[in-house]
Image: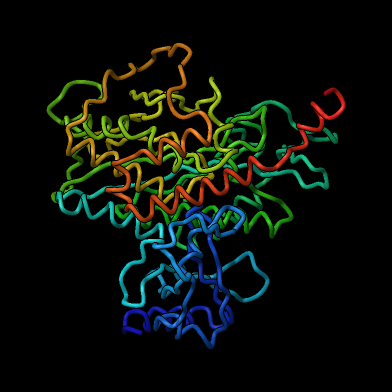
Amino acid sequence: MDRTGRAELDNFLERYPSIQMLEVLMPDMNGIFRCKRIHRSEFAALFAGSLKCPATQSLVTTMGEYDHQVDPRLVAGEPDNKVLPVSGSLAPVPWLASPTGQVLASHYTPGDEPAWVDPRHVLAGVLERFVAMGLRPVIATELEFYLVSPGDGVVPKPLLGRIPGTAMEQQGIQFALAEDMWQYDAFLDAVRIACEQQSVPMTTMLSEFAPGQWEINTRHVDDPLLACDHALLLKRIVKGVALQQGLSATFMAKPFAASAGSGLHIHASLYDGNGNNVFSDPASAATPALSPLCRHAVGGLVATMSEAMALFAPNANSYRRFVPGTYAPLAPSWGYNHRDVSLRIPVSGHDNRRIEHRVAGADANPYLVAAAVLAGMHHGITSRCDPGPMVAEGTDLPAQVQSLPSHWEAALARFDRSTLLPRYLGAAYCSAFGSMRRAECEAFRACIPNLDYEWYLRAV
């Protein structure tokens, strides 16, 4: 263990002397933490690099299953990787009754090289492209989710507010209703406290554009890896606090057919070595005052959106979110101050000009979404891509023709044909990702849902 790691661990244990167990959190390709809980006697060994995990732990389906369709040349024999903590990520777990801490961790080879199976390293590889250009990406996330009504039924329901003096539930969208926050203040405040204890820079909470739906935003940071850590930790906090309070939370993209889906919006901007936002053109009188470099970045995102759809919408339920008229994008459009487009230029000043990427669902892996977004931006800048005409502010979009892949199989087929993403994310990772997502897709399609019986069993 180096001195920095030793000091970090000692300071943490001095601050939280009662902690006896540590949850080691390792993100898989789905954006789900795979976890080992270790005893205090093993903390030092973890920081010294003694903890091992199979490389395939990161290459699993949403159900946690590994499928041997992955090219055996990549992970033959399921070799072990070394697991090392992410500096600065030690924190308590406030929703657990037992004195427990947590730490993020990444996979490394036995020779201490970043392991290609780890989505954090996939994003880190894309970031190196911008370092070489002397540019610094700044990222923030917006995450939507539902609180789910407790019950024993097979079909879940959103958790709605109660009408005072009655047993009735509040109907209607009731966007940004203060009374919803009052009713669930204990939950929201516990989320705030956990965010502060775990150094997740939560900024804003609101009840979203569907009954029972919420949104929490995080602050922009100039380290996209850290921004994605924040997003995944925020999901863990929301679910952990909900569990503690007898509630349930879900980040499914479309848990309720009649309600809006939940998205993961990425806000991205670029700065040069002098701290100037290179997406803005201060000499321009246009609204918005975009630099040519910003237009090229948008052009790259437009050009790569279809082939990255399997990353933005990673499972069968993801594609239920793309319904006309629900602010879920159907085509690679872009515009200023317009929520119907895929790539929105928000109202902003020269110092915070940015692109809001609105395609990914809340179920997506934030590391892979950010990697695909930054890869598209880099491709656009280096290839001088033209984004086409911008949707003007206040323009009523006609019924959009869905040009993005509309179902899982089509998205996976388009991903497999991509020649650009393997250059950015790594050929091995793209191969394994495609194999595992196809395995899950085939398993999903092989199941016979209840609807088959309801529609066909008696009538056919």
Q: Is residue 321 left or right of residue 450?
A: left
Residue 415, horizontal then vertical, whole percent: 40, 40
Asked which colour scheme the image uses, the reply is: rainbow
User: Is residue 16 placed above or below 103 in the rendered structure?
Assistant: below
Q: Is residue 330 left or right of residue 244?
A: left
For the C terminus, the image quarter is top right
Residue at 20% x, 41% y: name it: 277
User: Is residue 322 placed above or below 9 in the rendered structure?
Assistant: above
Residue 419, horizontal then vertical, whole percent: 30, 41
Q: Is residue 422 left or right of residue 42?
A: left
Residue 423, horizontal then vertical, whole percent: 27, 48
Residue 183, horizontal then vertical, whole percent: 70, 43
- Residue nearest the viewer, comparing 381 with 80: 80
Residue at 65% x, 68% y: name it: 96
**Residue 319 seen:** yes
Which residue ends up furthest to the right in the rendered image?
A: 458
User: Is residue 145 placed above or below 399 in the rendered structure?
Assistant: below
Query: Quarter-wise, where is residue 339 in the image?
Result: top left
**Residue 181 seen:** no
Numbered disc total: 0
For the N terminus, the image quarter is bottom left
Query: Quarter-wise, where is residue 106 in the image?
Result: bottom left
Residue at 35% x, 44% y: name it: 372
Residue at 15% x, 24% y: name it: 284
